[in-house]
Amino acid sequence: MPSVYQNRSGNWECRIRRRGFPVQTATFDTKEEAKDWASTVEGDMVRGRFVDQREAERTTLAEALERYEREVLPRKRHERQEKSVVKTLLRHPISRMMLARVRSKDIAAYAARRQAAGIGPQQIRLDLGLLSHLFNIARREWGLEGLGNPVELVSKPRRPPGRNRRLEPGEEDRLVAAAKEYSSELPAFLVLALETGMRRAELAGLGWDRIDFERRTAHLPDTKTGEPRTVPLSPRALDTLKSLPRRLDGRLWSIGFLDSWTKAFRRTCKRAEIKDLNLHDLRHEATSRFFERGLSIEKVAAITGHKTWAMLRRYTHPRAEDIARELAAKA
């Protein structure tokens, strides 16, 4: 029989002693919770499904997150972004719970609290993805084989609808003009973004050793998908690159932080009086322009690095008025 008793702090402790199994102990807020746990554990012992949970009972989510940050994040591509997720989780009360005590309702409450704070669905999905990976790693690699993954039972918020913001007539000229007032590099950065369709990180990380003026290409060894690709350079892109001064460190830009480019772009939009435009929208604009120039799906995908038509389609926004003109021309 399990031993259930109330300790001096007012919590309820449960201890299970059964021949052939290690002693199991746990602490609960109520006597009913302690009895339910004892019933579950003893039932697993009888049915041969028992897995020792003592390690999970002694490890808080905060401790697991810190270990995940030390051992797992350095192996991941978006280490800096996910470190931010870890810091957010460590500030939340859920981090003080024991791993074995975290339930799907606790994960759902965390997601709801983030949503109430105005955090977007995509970021919440990233948070839940990291938590899910942590529980799987703990089960597969940290010796906590009996640990379940409560995140798998939680409904994730729907992905936000894809943006379809295109540059309106005159906005590109205003944007580049305003960028010239901000810095000498930002206008070139914006033009290259529109001419190549590169992601912010890909363009920001370019070095002169990746530019081949003879072949008119830029090689990207490190991309979001993990696969390198080579991007063709238009005449305008080549002229823009040739106008840049050569730096001694081999980089194209003096700005090193990605967030600095984003902040500079926001200030430029404000100066140019352009609303509802973000830096990533330029990748959408570039992709749409590739199709408007008559390039095939295969060629555009080779430039942008998209793996499927479904993903590429999210970046393609043909204007109805342009299609109407094309139909009239062919009539």
Image (tube, rainbow, N blue to C red):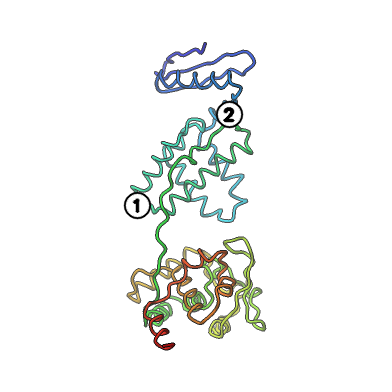
- Where is residue 214? Give x, y as percent: 67, 84
Q: Mark 1 belongs to which amino acid?
A: Gly
- Where is residue 177? Give x, y as percent: 40, 81
Circle 1 sits on which residue? 118
Q: On residue 55, which mark appears?
A: 2
Residue drawn at x 39%, y 20% is 30
Image height of 17 relative to 170, above or below: above
- Where is residue 171? Give x, y as percent: 37, 79
Residue drawn at x 58%, y 72% is 298
Q: Mark 2 belongs to which amino acid?
A: Glu
- Where is residue 151? Give x, y as percent: 48, 41
Residue drawn at x 55%, y 66% is 306
| In this picture, residue 278 sits left or right of residue 99 | left
Q: Secondary structure at mark 1?
A: loop
Measure the alpha-carbon separation of dots 1 and 2. Answer: 36 Å
Are circles 1 and 2 on residues that touch, CB within 8 Å? no
* Residue found at the far front of this picture: 331
Q: How many labels sit on residues?
A: 2
Query: Toward which corner of the image does residue 104 lie, by quadrant?
Result: top left
- 188 or 234: which is nearer to us? 234
- 136 or 14: which is nearer to us? 136
- 219 or 288: which is nearer to us? 288
Image height of 262 relative to 143, above or below: below
Q: Secondary structure at mark 2?
A: helix
Q: Earlier in the sequence, mark 1 or mark 2?
A: 2
Mark 1 burial class by Cα count in 10 Å: few <14, some 14-19, many 20+: few
Residue drawn at x 40%, y 44% is 111
| In this picture, residue 314 sits left or right of residue 44 | left
- 53 or 175: which is nearer to us? 53
